[in-house]
Amino acid sequence: MNKVELLAPAGSLEKLKMAVIYGADAVYIGGEEYSLRAYADNFDRQDMREGIKFAHLHGKKVYVTLNIIPHNEDLKAMPAYVKEIEELGADAVILSDPGVYSLVKENAAGMEIHLSTQANNTNWKSAEFWYRHGIKRVILARELSLKEIGEIRENTPEGLELEIFVHGAMCISYSGRCLLSNYMAGRDSNRGLCAHPCRWKYYLMEEKRPGEYMSVYENERGTFIYNSKDLCMIEYIPQIIESGVSSLKIEGRMKSSFYVATVVKAYREAIDAYYDNPGNYRFNRNWLEEISKASHREYTTGFYLGKPTGEDQIYHTSSYIREYDFIGLVKAYDEATGIAEVEQRNRMFCGEEMEVVRPKGPFYVQKIKWMKNAENEDIRVAPHPQMTVYMPMDRPVEEYTMLRRKADEKEKG
């Protein structure tokens, strides 16, 4: 049985490495140009080269986004950029525009092409059309049910790969084609500059009563009328795989390394558990608990199980739920002494309890018994961002092991 691909976001070189180490089969990245996440760290040429090399050494793939809706000026430097992506060894490009498609075909004829969800593929005839024109994979629109996806699979060539989103933020607009940001903030979401006005709080003002703001209520809970819950399909892995798709995509190039690693690991375990014994697969609640330890909104199944209702919106806040802090990342471990070199990510203290999350296997809990700084001095607190700290570990750990703790009540939200 060919395993479905687990595809993870990578907004920076570190996030790429974390995604790969924690179980992604492939990652998608954006360069400094032509990506729909202009405010992600993104990849310069050196980082892209290093990231592709790292992924390939681990037997993983890298897809590069070219999914903006370009204007004339965007096309000038694109041919050279496309050639460079191919020379760097990227496994595919993700695009939505026919003009960009033509430029890739003209300048990197051997490059595999994936059609972005921005192209709004909602039916099998459209998918078949793109396949006949050389598209290897179609990333389906998020507005489809699992039933519709199954019908697309039944009516398209076996060689066409289908990719769907399974986790992350949902866009209020049709497959992400939104003009709201452009209108409200002068920032073009279709060129990577979305200001996320769908998360803002809105009021109503009557024309002849300027300055009198009335709350907008769909019900009595609040006024965030465009604010979708986050997609989460980890409870439906069998149904998703059996729909016939080739790749399960996690949204979030703007998310943290902690988020990427946490979510990837949970989905990796769920997918592997299904393939280990499809007939006796059982959902493990620990997987949902784990992904909920990363920053998130309340969850929805989107369109997969039926059309969303008012229950799939959040009316009272646009804030995230954040109940855990990422406090450190293991950079090295000395087996002889049991001491780890840790890069600090949030203030941590001697004596506090933390969860130790390794790339594989369950986490364990221990206290920070003591810490030393880079000068080998005893310290009680590690207050400086990304400072180097040494501490004893109760069990062996490896590079990229994450340290986390429950957030203080005042820090949640």
Image: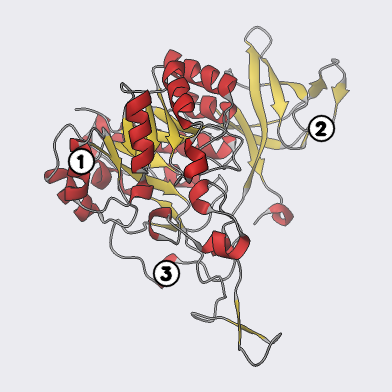
Amino acid at dot 2: His
Disc 1 target residue: 244
Proximity of marks 1 and 3: CB atoms separated by less than 8 Å: no
The quadrant in which residue 66 appears is top left
Amino acid at dot 3: Glu
Residue at 36 percent of width and 30 percent of height: 104
Proximity of marks 2 and 1: CB atoms separated by less than 8 Å: no
227 vs 26: above or below: below
> Label 1, label 3: how many angstroms apart (C-alpha)?
28 Å
Indicate the position of residue 87 as horizontal and vertical percent values: 44, 16
The quadrant in which residue 175 appears is bottom left
Disc 2 target residue: 384
Indicate the position of residue 364 as horizontal and vertical percent values: 56, 31
Q: Is any part of residue 250 visible from this angle? A: yes
Residue at 52 percent of width and 63 percent of height: 180
Residue at 79 percent of width and 24 percent of height: 371
Disc 3 target residue: 311
Q: Residue furthest bottom?
A: 208
Q: Is residue 291 left or right of residue 278?
A: right
* Front tag of 1 and 3: 1
* Front tag of 2 and 1: 1
